[in-house]
Image: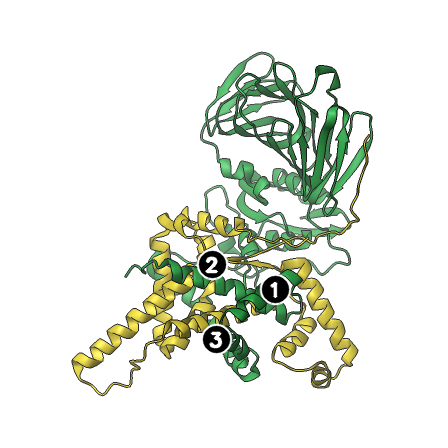
Amino acid sequence: MTPTFNEPDDQQAALLIRIAQLIAKERLGELQDAEREELDRWLGEDEQHRVWKDHLSSPEYVAEIQERFQASEESVEASLKSFHRDHLNNAPVRRLNGGARFNRWWMAAAVLVPLVIAGVWLAEKHSVPVPGPAPVVADVQPGRNKATLTLANGNRVLLDTGISGQLVQKGGVQIHYDQGKVEYQGLRLAENDVTYNTLTTAKGGEYQLVLPDGSKVWLNAASSLRYPTSFTGKERHVELTGEAYFEVAQRKDQPFSVGVGGMDVSVLGTEFDIMAYPEEGKKLTTLIQGAVKVENGKEVRQLAVGDQAAVAESGAMSVASNVNVESVIAWKLGFFQFNHIDLKTMMREIARWYDIDVVYQREDLSGEFGGRISRKLNLSELISLLEGNGVGHFKMEGRKLIVLP
Amino acid sequence: MESKGPIIYDDLQLIKEIESGSTVAFDQLYRQLYPALFVLAAKLTKSNEMAKDIVSEVFLQLWESRSTLHRVQNLKAYLYISARNRTLNYLKSNSLRAAEELTESNVSTWEPSAEEFFQALLHTETIRALREAIDTLPPECKKVVDLVLKGHSTNDIAQMLSISPSAVSHQKTRAVRILKDKVFLIVPGILIFFSPEIKFDLLQLSII
């Protein structure tokens, strides 16, 4: 009973899904010019297309489909439940967004499932959803593409969502910035033309950087990277604070290294994440691909893929294998992903992204949490997810988040 | 700054999650597309019972073949086509059975043509996308938009809801703004959530 895969049909279906979305946008009065053209082109292709679309102008017809939708939406949960019972031998995880009929995919991404240490689904215990916080006047927005670029002469350029532009620096180095990414282009400079720039994100900001050698760096919130405008010497060296994900361009003759206050990570061509927020104590280097060496002044350890080196404040280094890489790099993909962490660690990450302070009125902070949640939610939405899953009760006061007893 | 090409990242993410066995991701997909697939199958088979079985099978098949899900480029298209194929199988076996049993069957032996299927897909998907978008609106806004979509004029709506025409227009504008800000970049496959774009003037700096 495997459905035959018929490519033309598949493409036709994909096209019609796109057209349906354009028609929906048109109905909502938000069709852009280019989209209007796209829709008109499709309508002009075939007399039948117009007929198909015209059907949707009939209120009776649309009302009829709407009714069918309504009826089937009401039976979704029951149907999903029996599907789980019959085929998955379990029950579906309770919906988090009780009010809305639909779960948008980003809500799917927003599902946060706390685990107690034993791995019991805590969510199941809280069958009555805890109402979210009352609507507040000004919700706290999530972080966004926002950074400050500090040039060699101390001038600062604010990079924010929607701001784009370009700069030309000494030696002809060109810097473009647009859509959350700043990119360096230029030939290898003479040694004395090289200057240093710093890209800094505050709490609530993240930004992507393409270095002069083509290496890519994703800078998480409350972080900074100092780098030369051209890599000239025997090695490529940058300095990091906070957290960044690196995709290093391979250059055999010029090793790449990241300095993080007393710790040095040297690489050839690879992908890895370094998390070194002062408030987290230890510095974590996680290797996603390739090979890196981590050095703390006393020892050097070579990491294999999936390894995570932790350098404690004391300088002691330990290496764990097969760590959950997905949760380490989730931030880069737009999620928080927690994997057996305590409440305070979780709240620190949230605080960095929402640029808030967290105050604890609750004394018992024991328990471990796990789950995944979108970084695109407003703080109030995030809080109601946390509350709905029994993580705790919270109160927002401006940019202060109080963890209630 | 409207994105032009289809952004498939979230779609891929969903596929990846399901492929790795996440029932949470699967549930979300189920909730998101069950109604549309059901409406489509019911339209084609003219039977709610059959539609129910068909859609369950579509999802079961998706789940059982999740290890090869990365081959699917457009999840939604895949599910619609899968529902179509199953519907045809159902209708075929039904008419075969009717013929074998030589019964005066009231089961339809009608088979939808490709055109009928694609038209039904277009209509179902349009309504689905609209409902999904409207669902994110505040209640008062939603009421107005619901009526707009049913084809009522601003004045009609004003009368129906006992509010002024300008209040209706206001809610319409508000709806558009919210939809634009919050949700609305629908791309083939999946709805992408976008944070509000903040508009700034283009900043140009000269040589430093």
> Quick one: quadrant of the N terminus of chain A?
bottom left
Q: Are marks 1 and 3 on the same chain?
A: yes
Q: Is residue B32 left or right of residue A135?
A: left
In front: B39, or A30?
Answer: A30
Image vertical order of residue A378 relative to residue A103, above or below: above
- Whether residue A360 can be seen here: no
Q: Amino acid at mark 2?
A: Leu
Chain designation of label 1? A
Disc number for residue B191 = none
Place of residue B44 in the rendered image (x, y in percent of width and height, measured from the top left): 38, 75
Q: Which residue lies under the disc numbered 1?
A: A37
Q: CA distance from mark 1 to mark 2?
A: 31 Å
Q: Amino acid at mark 3?
A: Gln
Q: Are marks 1 and 2 in contact (CB under 8 Å)?
A: no
Q: Going 43% across and 59% down the picture, which residue do you hit?
A: A11
Q: Colour of chain B?
A: yellow
Q: Residues within 10 Å of mark 2 (few under 14, many from 20)?
A: many
Disc number for residue A48 = 3
Name the quadrant containing residue A310: top right
Chain designation of label 3? A
Q: Are marks 2 and 3 on the same chain?
A: no
Image vertical order of residue A303 relative to residue A83, above or below: above
Picture mark count: 3
Q: CA distance from mark 1 to mark 3?
A: 18 Å
Place of residue A313 in the rendered image (x, y in percent of width and height, measured from the top left): 63, 22
Image vertical order of residue A97 relative to residue A220, above or below: below
Place of residue A378 in the rendered image (x, y in percent of width and height, measured from the top left): 67, 53
Q: Going 58% across and 27% down the picture, which residue do you hit?
A: A284
Can you tell which chain is drawn green?
A
Q: Going 47% across and 64% down the picture, which residue do you hit?
A: B33
Q: CA distance from mark 2 to mark 3?
A: 31 Å
Disc number for residue B29 = 2
